[in-house]
Amino acid sequence: MSAPQINISDVASLARLTLTPDETAKFSAQLTQILGHMETLSQIATGAVPEVTPPAQPALRQDIPTPSLSIEAALSNAPAQANDLILVPRILE
Amino acid sequence: MSLAYETIATLRRRLLSKEIHPRDILKDLFTQIDAREKTLHAYTYLHRESALAAAEKADLSLPLGGIPIALKDNLNTLGDPCTCASKILEGYKAPYDATAVSLLRQAGSILLGRTNMDEFAMGSSTENSALGLTRNPWDPTRIPGGSSGGSAAAVAGRIALAALGSDTGGSIRQPAALCGCVGLKPTYGRVSRYGLVAFASSLDQIGPLTRTVEDSALLLSVLAGHDPRDNTTDLRPPEKFLTQKNGSVQGLRVGLPKEYFLPGMDSETESAIRSAADWFKKNGATLVDVSLPHTPTAIAVYYILATAEASANLARFDGVRYGRRATDARDVLDLYHRTRSEGFGAEVKRRIILGTFVLSQGYADAYYRQAQKVRALLRQDFEKAFTQCDLLLTPTSPEPAFPLGERTQDPLKMYLADVFTISTNLAGNGAISLPCGFTKSNLPIGLQLIGPRFGEETILRAAHAFEQSHDFLQRLPPS
């Protein structure tokens, strides 16, 4: 497997980022180099190896309500709010 | 001598004997801060007034009563900023305490300030901070390491007694090594991550940066334990570390992984690490040659998995609920794009894009899933090595602190310097870095001791014995 050509603008859009032309050029070159280094992994035989999965959960707590953040505290950092709700720009036309 | 030069253990004894008052410690620390912080820029925020007020009502009966501690600026602390050294968290004030912060408060410590870091802990030099870079106390033209570079520079520069950091791929141990202090990354699951701003959740761990191994054990004893708010924390009962200090390494089997002694590595670093290994042998330990054969893949595995997890974790910074919000957005999608593009720095954007790519359709099998499988092989390497030895002894960093600006345009070269620390995060083990020598140009060199999972007591005992028979602590950075 050779390092793929990464379409930086498409991937950035998936990540909700808009890059400047300078960033696009710089990141394209850098990420091509980084992905080139990652090609070493394709040479490792892993056929029967199971993937590492998230750590086993040692215990789940009882499903009983406990004190949590107040509405006031939870909204204390909201850039815009009204009636205990966070305001965002229009989603539907 | 200024109390800022003392260790926590010594200050606790002096506080309990009423020889000094907590305000005396703060006074000396602030005198040092006023003299050195302008050069070092280790802090992003200082709690001058609240710390002095807390000193007046400190409860000395508690394990850290009256002891000021600094926090990396990615730990939520009620009412304080938590910038993660990013413009995107401008104006944010934490509405709750991280569990580690609660535990420090409950143990009586005084919160001194918040320390600089690479943005969202992404970096190895603290040059990726939107709040300005931090300098190495031993040579201000060089990096302090990262991402907990502010914590390490503060502790080594005698402007903090101790600080908390976080370690995802070496971010406690590497700056500790480069600044000449003690940095402990606990076993994954030892310390709660609740309230630590997440970078890569399967790798992140909070730990202490201190002057001595004894202080490291004191802090770990306070921080360790199960937390119902982080169900990756282990259920074992709380432990007190290093309560027995016999200073012996007699009978200890110390493994030297051959993959950590690379041709072409910095000769002064290699020489200091070989001398440290000789010390263990002379003092009754057995040196064992071991192999961690998948080490050469670790950088690739790490930068796939860590960026994949980061791309998901950092999706929360969207301008909706907290932090920066771009103005005049046309719609909600425009709001996300503009907020994130304006708010994140270059390294964070680079890693989010890489992480998004390795998870994307058509590439996830070749990158993300393959990396998870190789991670399993790396873990098996460690498990096998620990059937032959009790500890692994390695360099922490392949080289001492490098000059500021040297690698900012070459991210791959920056990533490759993490080669000796990241495998421990991928395997989940605990490890410490402690001073083991200096270069001819007076830069500290760090020794790494890696333990089996939950083997912190063995790590701390061996590190303490080594530290006690050397005088690296007596050497101070130029003032």
Image (cartoon, grey):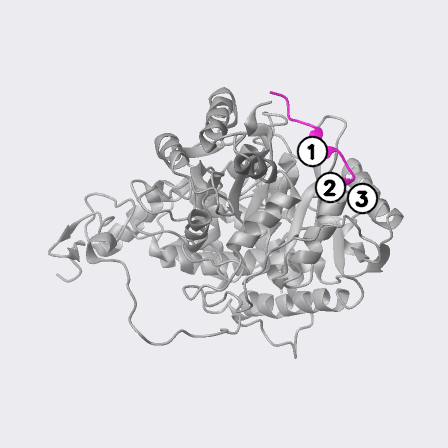
Element under disc 2: helix
Q: Tell me which label, 2 or 1, sits earlier in the chain.
A: 2
What percent of the width, then of the height, locates residue A40? Answer: 67, 60
Residue B47 shown in magenta: no
Tell me the kind of residue under disc 1. Answer: Leu
Same chain for the residues under marks 2 and 1 in the image: yes
Q: Position of residue B281 (x, y in %)?
A: 87, 50
In terms of sequence position, does the residue under pointer 2 or pointer 3 come before the other? 3
Residue B88 visible to an observer of this rendering: yes
| Residue B132 locus on image (x, y percent) | 45, 31
**Quarter of image, res B45:** top left
Cα distance in 3D space between marks 2 and 1: 8 Å
Return the residue at label 3.
Answer: B276
Look at the image and give the residue range highlighted in magenta. B467-479
**Mark number displayed over residue B467:** 2
CB within 8 Å, label 2 to label 1: yes
The answer to if B470 sits in the magenta stretch is yes
Real-space Cα separation, disc 2 to disc 3, in angstroms:
10 Å
Q: Residues within 10 Å of mark 3 (few under 14, many from 20)?
A: some
The image shows residue B176, relative to residue A32, as above or below, that is above
Q: Residue furthest bottom?
A: A48
Which image quadrant: the C terminus of chain B? top right
Q: Amino acid at mark 2?
A: Glu
The residue nearer to you, when weighing A4 against B346, is: B346
Q: Secondary structure at mark 1?
A: helix
Q: Main secondary structure of the magenta part?
A: loop
Where is B26 relative to A14, above or below? above
Q: Earlier in the sequence, mark 1 or mark 3?
A: 3
| CA gap, disc 1 and disc 3 | 15 Å
Quarter holding the N terminus of chain B? top right
Chain letter, disc 1 residue: B
